[in-house]
Amino acid sequence: MKKETITALVLGIGTGAVIAVGLLINARKINVSQTKPTPSVGATSVTLPIQSQPFVVRQPEDKKTVNDDELLITGEAPVKSTIVVQSQFSEQTIIAEKTTFEMNFALQYGENIIKVTNYDGKNISEKKLTVYYLPED
Amino acid sequence: MKKTFIIKMLALIFVLQYVNFAVEAQSPKLSPTATVTPTKTNAPNTVDHNVTALKEKIADKVEELQKKNKTTISGTITNIENRTITVEDRDSKKHLITHDDLLTKVKTITDKTVKDADFSSLKKDQYVVVTGIMLEDVFTPQTIFSFKKYDVISGKVADLNKTEFSVDILITDTRTITVDIESGTKQLSFDKASSSLKKGGFAQIKVGDYIHAVYLMPSENTFSRVSALRTILLPQTKEVTK
């Protein structure tokens, strides 16, 4: 066999061996990181403060144009909290019996500026809505 | 010799192709009667039907687009130039609205009645509600309603003036508005026991209570005194605050 052929064979086998060893080490590292025990969430108990139900008005969306003179207002509020709804033409109050509320609110022709306020102890939340009642247009 | 032969053959093929194309192009003109004749009597009906269907489709599409793109803007007129009004909404955003004699109507809303009006009746500082179609940022107004600008406020009663029948309401941590309770003000008070609104009066209002008030917005931007149209009192007792 020629000298060059032997050198090429040796170099080829050597390079292959280096790559194989490298791959083996890398694969072992991945296995180790995958089998590492993750800390259990339930192992330590964390006491969270009881969050009261936030006040949210789900319906109607602001700047909505409607064809009906009665508007359905829905949302979420803390139980036993007071909800006051007032516009330039009408007003209504309810006490939330559940965490969700809904009421029908009277509209008048044109722009209705509606303020929905929730009184839950010292927490007061409010949302102002503009609803257009324009049935003929 | 071979080359010349190939070139000749290619030229012949090209000429033959051209002739074939020319004949094909002319052929439909030569035989229209044969195909049209049998459908002669049905053609107008079919065309009419198709046109009607197309018209209906277009009308439906226009209606759908109008509904989808219907927009209502409200605000104060800050400028009038020719047939264009500048309307500044409650968020201080300005809208340019060009009145179209054919498309745009002008109306006045007073309480529950709506009356027709002219474009010339619109004045600077007037509050308007404008409906129209918004298509690719171009607003086409349909109706301009002149309207009154109302607002609703609420807050804690900071002070009372029993001589002037006025209430200072703390609407934010730093802003107080004096609200005059007039003889015509509709006053209501919330009764938690019955969970209903009952007739109220100025004598029931106490410092520390919560009060809601509706008023007509004064024309000036900075104001500290308004006249109440209607109020709701929430007495600051154990009933209101848990």
Image: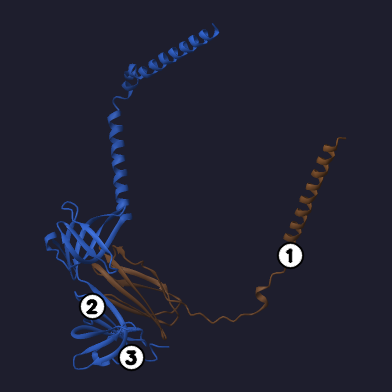
Chain colours: A brown, B blue
**Marks 2 & 3 on one chain:** yes
Residue A35's disc is 1
Placement of B226 over or under A58, stated as above or below: below
**Please, what secondary structure does the residue beneath circle 2 have?**
loop
Quadrant containing the N terminus of chain B in the rendered view: top right
The residue carrying mark 2 is B222
Residue type at tag 1: Thr
Above or below B35: residue B86: below
Chain bearing tag 2 is: B
Q: The residue under label 3 is which amino acid type?
A: Gly
- Compute the Cα span from label 2 to label 3: 25 Å
Q: Residue at x 65, y 73 (%)?
A: A41
> The residue tagged with tag 3: helix, strand or loop?
loop
**Which of these two is toward me, A56 or A103?**
A56
A18 and A38: which is toward the camera: A18
Total residue callouts: 3
Give the chain of mark 1. Answer: A
Lower sequence index among marks 2 and 3:
3
Q: Are marks 3 and 1 in contact (CB under 8 Å)?
A: no
Q: Where residue B235 sits: x, y (%)?
A: 33, 89
